Amino acid sequence: MTSIGHRNFDLDIDNYRYEDSLTRLAYFPVILKQLLENCRKSIATVKVVGKWSIHENIGHLILLEKLWSSRFQDIKGGNQNMSSADLNNFATDQASFNKYPLNNLTKSLVHERDQTIALLQNMNEEDFLKTSIHPRLNRPMSILELMHFVSEHDTNHMRSMLFIIANTENN
């Protein structure tokens, strides 16, 4: 179990979990899109307790999809270290995601994730044996472990968005 802030991630994953992990990654944006289909703009753009709005959460996920792809390629390529992230989330904060229609954001997330899924589907068995050091965790991670990490990150942001909906629906 690895702890990141107040969240714990179970990174002890066996190779047989590939299909489950791939399915979880592939369907997350589709499920999110369906969940938010009828979300009013007044809810989707509100910040609750000073945190990102639903639009900003989705924008953050879109921006990170390129990082995830780079990190999967880092592992496949045998790079010792994975690509670094913008830990201050400057790009998310500066992108003004609340100005974009929610439907455009969810479509973009689906498109970006589809590209990541295609990359993962083209990995071979040898690729899954490789590891690369995660820059913040400072530990080696395999492709499967990173897949799980990304899924947990998705889930964390889904929880944030559901919290916003639950705390603004009746207002």
Image (tube, grey):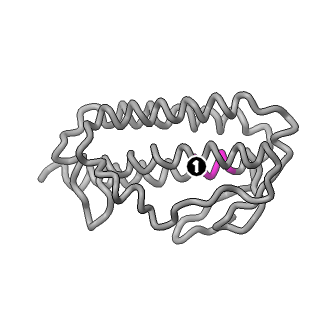
The amino acid on which the numbered mark 1 sits, given as a three-letter code, is: Leu
**At 87% across and 38% down in the image, what residue appears?**
126
Give the vertical position of 152 relative to 112 (above or below). Answer: below
In this rendered view, identify the residue nearer to me: 21 or 128: 128
Work out which residue is located at the far left of the displayed protein and give it: 171
Please provide percent x and percent y for residue 33. Answer: 37, 33
Q: Quadrant of the N terminus?
A: bottom right
Please provide percent x and percent y for residue 98. Answer: 25, 48
User: Circle 1 — which element?
Assistant: helix
Residue 167 as seen in the image, left or right of residue 81: left
**At 42% across and 51% down in the image, what residue appears?**
60
State how many labels appear: 1
In this rendered view, identify the residue nearer to me: 139 or 69: 69
Q: Quadrant of residue 36?
A: top left
Residue 134 as seen in the image, left or right of residue 40: right
Mark 1 sits on what residue?
67
Please provide percent x and percent y for residue 74. Answer: 73, 48
The range drawn in magenta is: 146-151
**At 40% across and 37% down in the image, what residue appears?**
32
Majority secondary structure in the magenta region: helix
Q: Quadrant of residue 17?
A: top right
For residue 2: magenta?
Answer: no
In this rendered view, identify the residue nearer to me: 129 or 90: 90
